[in-house]
Amino acid sequence: MAESTSTGASAELVGVSYVMPVLNDVTHVRAAVDSLLSQDYAGPFEVAIAVGPSIDGTNELVDELSRADARIRVLPNPVGSTPAGLNIAISATRYPVVIRVDAHSVLPTNYARIAVETIEQTGADNVGGIMDAQGNTPFERAVARAYGSRVGLGGTPHHVGGAAGPADTVYLGVFRREPLESVGMFDERIKRGQDWELNRRIRAAGGIVWFTPELKVTYRPRPSLTALARQFFSTGMWRGELTRRFPSANTLRYFAPPVMVLGVGLGVVLGLVGLVQAAAGMTTPLLLGWLVPVLYLLLVVLAAVVVARRDGIRSQLWFLIVLPCIHFCWGVGFVLGFLALASNISALKNERTGGASVGRVD
């Protein structure tokens, strides 16, 4: 890679390849692509969009974008999954730096420039920053607030920020092509959490994954409770699968939501049995089981008051629903995935749909 001058510009700027998998993303993909074309990075670039079998007009929209700008290529992704689409796009591009983009993301104008400078300064194989969730509706703002809070997604640096330095994984990722290809790119058997698994292989090969808070990407949350529930159930299921496959000390925090789910569920069962016993005139300690769900409910209410207080009453009320939805869907999914059911459910879904994923790629 070219060395930067003291002014921050490069004598010979390295080319970058933006790769984006999309599926049923007609609402967001134009904004995502526009953010790539608006980058202030002066080096050469190309955009590769791997589009799955969509039914909402996404195919027509990306074809229109490609016709309007020769730097944009549209590639078919028959499987429809995120890792398959990423590998298709990476294989079809040529520049030394690969920038992974999500159709729900909007890159700030300085994103590519800062990312390339960070790679040059640190020697990292992959750099990434913060997923800055921003919502437009009261529901989306509640989801965004949950994303960016420790009570929501656990407070990892790529959600809440932190000091620059080596990391286990980062949001999206800006890769040096050579090490990315040498480790085999994305594992197409893993439908969610593929970024974490790829970064695990990069680190195992001696590479550096680098987090920097200077990179902040706007992310648009799911627009409905049903879509949010599906997203977190699937994410939790694959996280459970990956935790079972690759156990380490850093994976212990992933057990917090499933432990909470099991604790609340057990507390409700014991409390209900206690109520039956009390109605029968029996003295029973099982009524104490209600303490766990009550304490969790108090935690959710407190979080809505403190975390979502700046978003208005409607977002606060949605937060009371969004937070348990995230916790319980993720936690239940994790348990199923940890019990080795993620792969079986994915295989069954592929069999029913002829190999193509249903729903949105991300």
Image (cartoon, helix red, strand yellow):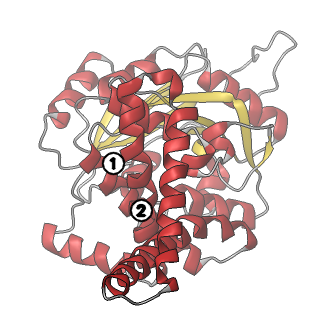
**Quick check: 116 above or below 108?**
below
Q: Is residue 59 left or right of residue 217?
A: left
Q: Is residue 42 left or right of residue 134?
A: right
* Label 1 – label 2 distance at C-alpha: 12 Å
Q: Is residue 189 visible?
A: no
Residue at x 60% of width, y 24% of height: 111
Q: Please determine whether, in this image, residue 96 is positioned above or below residue 169.
A: above
Q: Where residue 362 appears, x then y in whole percent? A: 39, 48
Q: Quadrant of residue 34?
A: top left
- What mark, if any, has residue 81 been given in the picture? none
Q: Earlier in the sequence, mark 1 or mark 2?
A: 1
Residue drawn 32% across and 18% down?
69
Q: Between 75 and 112, which is closer to the camera in this rendering?
A: 112
User: Viewer-nearest of labels 1 and 2?
Assistant: 2
x%, y% of residue 332?
A: 41, 70
**Labels 1 and 2 touching (C-beta < 8 A):** no
> Residue pushed farthest top?
7
Q: Is residue 189 above or below residue 85?
A: below
Residue lying farthest right? 6
Amino acid type at mark 1? Leu
Q: Which mark is residue 228?
A: 1
Where residue 347 appears, as percent x and y from the top left, is 28, 77
Q: Quadrant of residue 335?
A: bottom left
Q: Which residue is mark 2?
A: 328
Badge 2: residue crowd in 10 Å (few <14, some 14–19, many ≥20): many
Residue at image position (42%, 54%) is 324
Amino acid on which disc 2 is placed: Phe
Q: Is residue 152 visible?
A: yes
